[in-house]
Image (cartoon, rainbow, N blue to C red):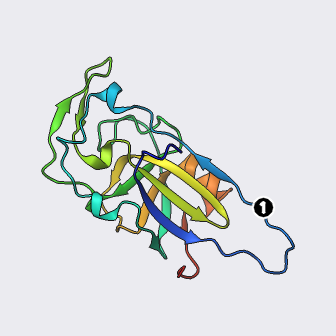
Amino acid sequence: MPSFLPMLFLLLSVQLLSFLPFSFSASLSVPPAYSTKDTCLSESSATDSISAQLNKPNTGGQFTFYGIGGQGACGLDTDTPTKSAAGSGTLFNSNAAWVESCLPDARYLLNDLVCINRCVKIEYKGNTLTVPINNKCSECAKDHVDLSEEAFNWLEPGGGSVGVAKSEKQIK
C-alpha cells in the first residue's frame, strides 16, 4: 500500500498459536479505484471528521459484510474495487458538500476527507487486509467496519455463514 494514503486501523486479533513452530500469514493491500487527479477532489477544501482517527489502532472491534452495487455514500461505485469498506458514520462530516467530479460521467462526489483515498487496515487471525473506504455504515461504531463480501471472505473464508467477526481479546 502506498505510504501516502492515511489509514484507519482496526485491529482485531493477531494472536498466534504458540505450539506451532511457524505461522502462515497473508497480507493484501487494495488501492482506491480513483486518485484525486481522477476525481478532482481536493484534500485542502474537503471537510474533515476522520483525521482524529487516522493511523490510530482501534482494538477489540468487529467487521461485518454488506452487498455491493451502485454508488455509496461517497458517490463512488461500491463494487470498484471489489474489496472495499464502508466506514463508520461517525467518520463522515454531515456538512460535507457534493461537488462535480472530473470522472468521465461527471458525477457528484462527497467532498469529505473520508472519501478521498482513505483506507482501513484490518489485522485478523494473522492476516492483514487494507482496503479503501468508499461507503458509509451509519449504524457502525468507530471500531466497526462493514466490508464488501469479497473483502470479508478474504479475512474469514466461508464468511457467508459467519457474518460477523469479533476480536477475542484486546491487543495491548
Identify which residue, 17 or 146, lies in the foreground: 17
Against 138, residue 169 (above or below) is: below
> Where is mark 1, residue-wise?
24
In the foreground, 164 or 168: 168
Residue at x-position 45% and y-position 38%: 32
Residue depicted at x 66% and y 67%: 125
Residue 7 in the image: state x and y as whole percent: 42, 54
Residue 93 pos. (x, y %): 19, 54
Which residue shows up at 29% across the image and 41% down it? Answer: 74
Label total for image: 1
Give coordinates of residue 110: x percent, y percent: 23, 40
Determine the image quadrant of residue 45: top left
Three-letter residue code for mark 1: Phe
142 up-or-down from 104: above or below: below
Rendering quarter of residue 55: bottom left
In which quarter of the view is residue 20 placed?
Answer: bottom right
